[in-house]
Amino acid sequence: MNARAPRYTVLFSLMIVVNTSNVFGQSAIAYEAKAGMNASVVLTNIRNQPPGRLRYEMMENLAVGLMNCGDSCLSRQDIDIIDGMLRDEDDSARFWMATILGNLGARAQNSIASLQSALAERPCREGTISSAVAVRLALTKLGAEPAYLPC
């Protein structure tokens, strides 16, 4: 590894490999872990991807990969991008970004206000899983009391 590489280079990182082979009318999507891609690139790819299965899986893989990564995987700029995605129209983006922020702990303290705003905007949603669940958990992990607003 280059000694001058940024501290937040993500070793697990995600390289998205899209296989457009037609299988019963659907595209097959595969993910492959590659060393060397940094989190900023992954986050930019996620932001630029339209809502759907590929974007959902990209966010899920990023969240899972970051769970064991420690403090050095994300820069302050990366955390700000994640914070900004709490305003995304796609509820799954809000869910996964809140999950990442909750797992970051103290480094995500500046995101408490954004998490509270996201919860106020979408306190609940019909369906089995909504961003509100992840936002409440993230706020609890960060030591902030989540508001329990009526639907």
Image (cartoon, helix red, strand yellow):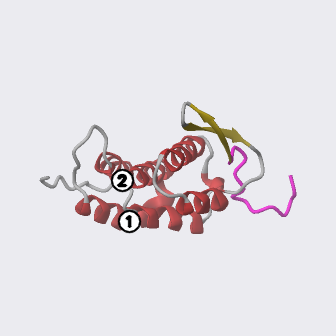
The label shown at residue 79 is: none
**Secondary structure under the numbered disc 2 in the rendered image:** helix
Q: x and y percent of residue 109 in the render? A: 43, 62
Out of 107 and 17, give the one closest to the viewer.
17
Instruction: Give the side of residue 67 with respect to residue 36, left or right.
Output: left
The label shown at residue 91 is: 2
Name which residue type carries label 2: Asp
Q: Which residue position holds label 1? A: 87
Extreme residue toward the right, this view:
2
Extreme residue toward the top, this view:
24
Name which residue type carries label 1: Arg
Out of 65 and 111, give the one closest to the viewer.
65
Q: x and y percent of residue 3 in the render? A: 86, 59
Q: x and y percent of residue 97 in the render? A: 45, 54
Q: Which residue is depicted at the point 60% across and 40% down?
A: 68
Which contiguous range is marked in magenta? 1-15
Chief secondary structure of the magenta portion: loop
Q: Which residue is depicted at the point 63% across and 45% down?
A: 69
Number of numbered discs overlaid on the protein picture? 2
In the rendered image, the vertical position of residue 13 relative to residue 28, given as above or below: below
Out of 79 and 46, give the one closest to the viewer.
46
Q: Residues within 10 Å of mark 2 (few under 14, many from 20)?
A: some
User: Disc 1 to disc 2, how far (Cα)?
Assistant: 9 Å
Q: Is residue 134 magenta?
A: no
**Secondary structure under the numbered disc 1 in the rendered image:** helix
Q: Which residue is depicted at the point 58% across and 63% down?
A: 78
Q: Is residue 6 magenta?
A: yes
In the rendered image, the vertical position of residue 121 relative to residue 126, given as above or below: below
Q: Which residue is depicted at the point 50% across and 58% down?
A: 50
Extreme residue toward the left, this view:
150
